[in-house]
Image: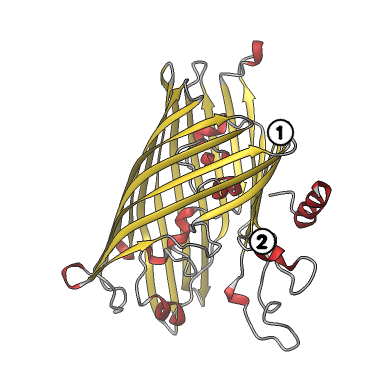
Amino acid sequence: MRKTLVVVLLIGSINLLFSTGARVMTMGRSDHFFMDDVSIFRNPANTNIYPNMLIGDLGVYVEDPSVDGDTAGFTALRSKNRDPQRPFFGGIVSYSLNKSSEGGDQYPMISLGAALNRYDEMLMYLDPKDEEFLGIGDTTKTALLGSHNFAKPVGKVDVMLGFASKSGAMFGFGTYFAFQKKKVNDDVEKEMKLIKGNFGVNLPVAKTVDLEASVSGGVMSQIGDTNNVALTVADNDYFVNADFRLFSALSALNGDFVPHLGFDLLTFNEGEQKQLGFNAGFGVNINIDRGFFWTGIEGFYVNNESKKISGVNRYDEVKKMGGRISFGIERNIIWDWLVWRLGATKMLAVQTTGGIDGTTEWIENPEADGSDKDHVAFGWAINIENRLKIDAIFAEDVFHTFSNLFSGNHHHLFTRFSATYSF
């Protein structure tokens, strides 16, 4: 039975070995209360924590509605694109300025990182296929998408520079670029742009306490045009994000107590629409026998105010206030190199739409739709000597249908693969 399980896992993962968001998505959907290598994109100072590393993600295994169809001779299943979406790859190269490097001490150190094709979280506000499009979930979204074409970003490049001082204080700068512009007879038909910069620190502020903080900001544009009718989602509109957390060692639990605070301000439609958000909470992470566990609770508040866009009636205001509780656990199973993971998150909030004349209702995250926001996730990983790490997320129905692996319509075993290699 043990050998059969391993064979099935390998069948599902063949040709998927170059792929890091999978660990976070499996471990409670958020890394606010523990450290993971994906934090380098939020705080470039953390490139010094993961020196000399290759990183990649095969993408998210979902359908692409833009290529759906009823092609003759094909089943409905085969007429849809089921290739992974939004893959990326990159790496970090570090150079120690300590010529002696006695006892493995590499500080001071410089780290240079880069990634290609990574889908930054800010792009979701400019992507018509994302539920966060326009920064608000309004009832006219379907109509807007049916009558306007929007540019898809190309480029999508991360560049990061980090420095670690002799004292262990870390600093980092990062940039991100995504863009597109289509002209017809020298007239701009549609345009998309995201330019982002961020600065971060990771500082020892006491003997057992480290401060991690990052601030990012930039400009974005998304302009569509169909039949000479333009829709401006954003035109060099600005955004600002800030993130703070403390890692306070808990010797009795062999882990950390982690308070977290986040803030973001986004503007759209040439400043006619603004979204202001806060989130704050605390959690703990604990090193357990042959594994790791974390849990946390946080509250959030989001206020999105908007006016009419190109004559389209939209809600004047949408407010969300609530909280979420999450946990994640991972443990070596059977062999030291095989890791199993389970995580869950539950969000509950009150949403008020339209001000005094609007509606108020309770909302929650989806229970099971295969997205990065739904209730629970389960996965596994391969960890070879902490050098090669391959992380995967199981499809949520795999334990009920076994994905029709041996009969019926072919389905998928996993929804995402990520990997890192330290050299």
The residue singled out by tag 2 in the image is: 398
251 to the left or right of 421? left
Query: Which image quadrant is residue 266 in?
Result: bottom left
| Secondary element type, mark 1 | loop
Q: Which of the image's four quarters has the C terminus?
A: top right
State whether residue 359 appears in this view: yes
Q: Are marks 1 and 2 in contact (CB under 8 Å)?
A: no
Q: Residues within 10 Å of mark 2 (few under 14, many from 20)?
A: some
Mark seen at residue 248: none
Kind of residue at badge 1 = Arg
Identified at 43% across, 16% down, the residue is 207
Farthest front residue in view: 1
Identified at 36% across, 52% down, the residue is 239
Task: Give the vertical position of 30 relative to 107 (above or below).
Answer: below
Identified at 65% across, 64% down, the residue is 400
Farthest bottom residue in view: 72
Query: Which image quadrant is residue 351 in?
Result: bottom left
Identified at 67% across, 47% down, the residue is 380
Task: Give the vertical position of 141 relative to 366 (above or below).
Answer: below
Q: Residues within 10 Å of mark 1 (few under 14, many from 20)?
A: few
The location of residue 369, given as percent across then percent down, is 53, 65
| Residue sitting nearer the eye, 344 or 318 | 344
Kind of residue at badge 2 = Val
First along the sequence among labels 1 and 2: 1
Mark seen at residue 387: 1
State whether residue 58 appears in this view: no
Task: Give the vertical position of 179 relative to 63 (above or below).
Answer: above
127 to the left or right of 350? right
